[in-house]
Image (cartoon, rainbow, N blue to C red):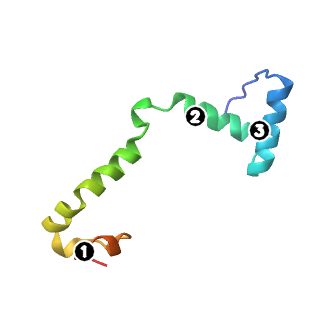
Amino acid sequence: MSKSVTIRVPEELHAQLQERAETEGTTVTALITEAARNAVRDPRLEGAAEVFRQFVADNADAFDAAFLDDAPARLDAAEAPGRAA
């Protein structure tokens, strides 16, 4: 179930929202809804994906050595000789 929320924005901002919505093939409502979701998102999650990617990159060799038969093919195999391709 959804709730209706009415806000007032300056005409210039509304025009910018409409232009962006058209460019992205969406609606002004969808843009504002996404902005509201971002406003209440847990700040502890900011950057979490990048931290995880970096952890995996930094420790990939150790994981591969520990689980030799399960090491996945890597996109950067050409840059890492001896790794599964």
Element class at badge 3: helix
Q: Residues within 10 Å of mark 1 (few under 14, many from 20)?
A: some
Apparent side of residue 37 relative to residue 52 in the rendered image (left or right): right
Residue drawn where x is 18% and y is 75% of the image? 69
Name the mark nearer the viewer: 2 or 1: 1
* Residue at the left extreme of this rendering: 66
> Which residue is the site of mark 2?
37
Q: Quadrant of the N terminus?
A: top right
Q: Earlier in the sequence, mark 3 or mark 2?
A: 3
Residue drawn where x is 39% and y is 32% of the image? 44
- Image position, residue 17 (x, y; %): 78, 36
Residue drawn where x is 70% and y is 39% of the image? 31
Residue 1 in view of the camera: no
Apparent side of residue 58 relative to residue 1 in the rendered image (left or right): left
Query: Residue 83, which numbered label?
Result: 1
Amino acid type assigned to the residue bearing label 3 in the image: Val
> Which residue is the site of mark 3?
28
Label 3 to label 1: alpha-carbon separation: 48 Å
The answer to which of 10 and 79 lies nearer the viewer is 79
Say above or below: 67 vs 55: below
Q: Earlier in the sequence, mark 3 or mark 1?
A: 3
Amino acid type assigned to the residue bearing label 1 in the image: Arg
Q: Residues within 10 Å of mark 2 (few under 14, many from 20)?
A: few
